[in-house]
Image (cartoon, rainbow, N blue to C red):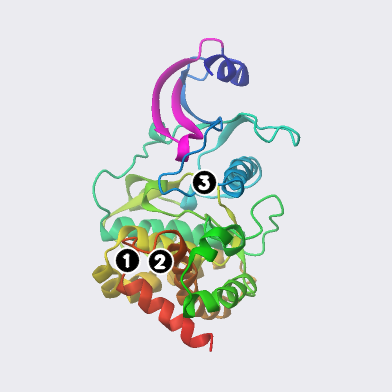
Amino acid sequence: MLKTIQQLLDDPQLTYIETLQELWSGYGEVTRYFSPMRAATVIVKSVNPPKNITHPRGWHSRVGHQRKLSSYIIEANFYQSYAHLCPQACYVPKIITFSKPQENEAEAEQTLVMEDLQQLGFADKETALSLNDIKAVISWLANFHACFIGQPADDLWPVGTYWHLKTRLDEFNNMEDGPLKKAANFIDSKLNNARYQTIVHGDAKVANFCFSDLETKNITEIDNNLTNTLTNKISLVAAVDFQYVGKGVGVKDLAYFLGSCLTDNDLTRLHNELLDHYFKVLGLACNKYQPDINVSELEDEWRNLYSFANADFHRFLQGWSPEHHKVNGYLKAQSGLALQDCT
């Protein structure tokens, strides 16, 4: 592996520093190297599919294997063709170089070499997110979604998110019969046929965001109108792991993120405040990046689809892991709101 990275970077003195994490189900690893030629560390995401596939929850199939392989190729497409379009307000690490398999080499190793967010001052959160941290991620999502509304994305997933119904038919078939299963296709169609489509991250959980505490006044990409909604410091955010990036409505990312970082009670208590924050930032970002968009129409559509986004994820969990802790009162209540509109 070291020799491969040295050749990719044209840096024979490149040295290995550490392994940061293993990829899901043993499909590879994320590592850090030091490049003397660049006088900087780099992050390497290397994919080398295992011969014997195992899944922590027992979900392993040829369909799932192919989905993972496709996800790594799509992630490389995103970093190559879209990441550079992201402004500071929705920062994404820049790709340095990559190698991916040819069409007839679907099982081959793939390697992405990216800038090291740690060198830029970003770090994972070792403690629970504060309300300001949560709002900072929501601001990242709103800016990201605003940037890509109406963006053609034929080389990404046709429908973003890892729980998309057509890619999760095994889980769907595993669901018990009931209102959510009966409405699954309607919910899927409602989300996919929305007028306003953007590019969604597709796996916007806490673990995929890094934070850098900076004085608000030093963040030029954040509109001054937002500073009164935050404290004297704001967490500038960067995002990683774009394996399931693709077309969709922005509230799919929002619903998934909030469910990844808040308890049942906090989701209910903070629901209005956090949705209002998302749509406030989204409106400001649209005015900045896409001034021709009717912000009022966009907000009306996506607010109405928020419950459908929750129901869509609930459908996946009900088939994949019905006892999962995220299947809580808030998720059930939001699904109930969507189901009322399905009748």
From the viewer's perspective, is residue 261 above or below residue 98? below
Residue 234: give x, y in percent of width and height. Answer: 32, 53
Question: Circle 1 sits on which residue?
Answer: 228
**Quick one: 340 or 156, which is closer to the camera?**
340
In the rendering, which numbered label is found on residue 60? Answer: 3
- Residue range highlighted in magenta: 12-33
Tell me the element at label 1.
helix
In percent of width and height, residue 199 lies at 59, 58
Amino acid type of the residue tagged 2 in the rendering: Asn
* Cβ–Cβ under 8 Å for marks 3 and 2: no
Task: Considering the whole magenta stretch, tell me its main secondary structure.
Answer: strand
Are dots 2 and 1 in contact, CB under 8 Å?
Answer: yes
Q: Amino acid at mark 1?
A: Asn
Could you say where residue 109 lies in the image, as x and y percent from the top left?
61, 29
Which residue ends up furthest to the right in the rendered image?
104
- Quadrant where the N terminus sits is top right
Mark nearer the viewer, 3 or 1: 3
* Picture disc at residue 225: 2
Instruction: Label 3: state its secondary structure.
Output: loop
Q: CA distance from mark 3 to mark 1?
A: 48 Å
- Marks 3 and 1, the one that precedes in the sequence: 3
Element assignment for label 2? helix
Q: Residue at x 39, y 72 (%)?
A: 275
Dot 3 surroundings within 10 Å: few (below 14), some, or many (20 or more)? some
Q: CA distance from mark 3 to mark 2?
A: 48 Å
Q: Amino acid at mark 3?
A: His
Residue 192 in view in this figure: yes
Q: Residue at the location (37% across, 72% down)?
A: 331
Q: Can residue 285 be spotted in the picture?
A: no
In the image, is residue 26 part of the stretch drawn in magenta?
yes
Rendered residue at 57%/35% (across/down): 95
Quadrant in which residue 74 is drawn:
top right
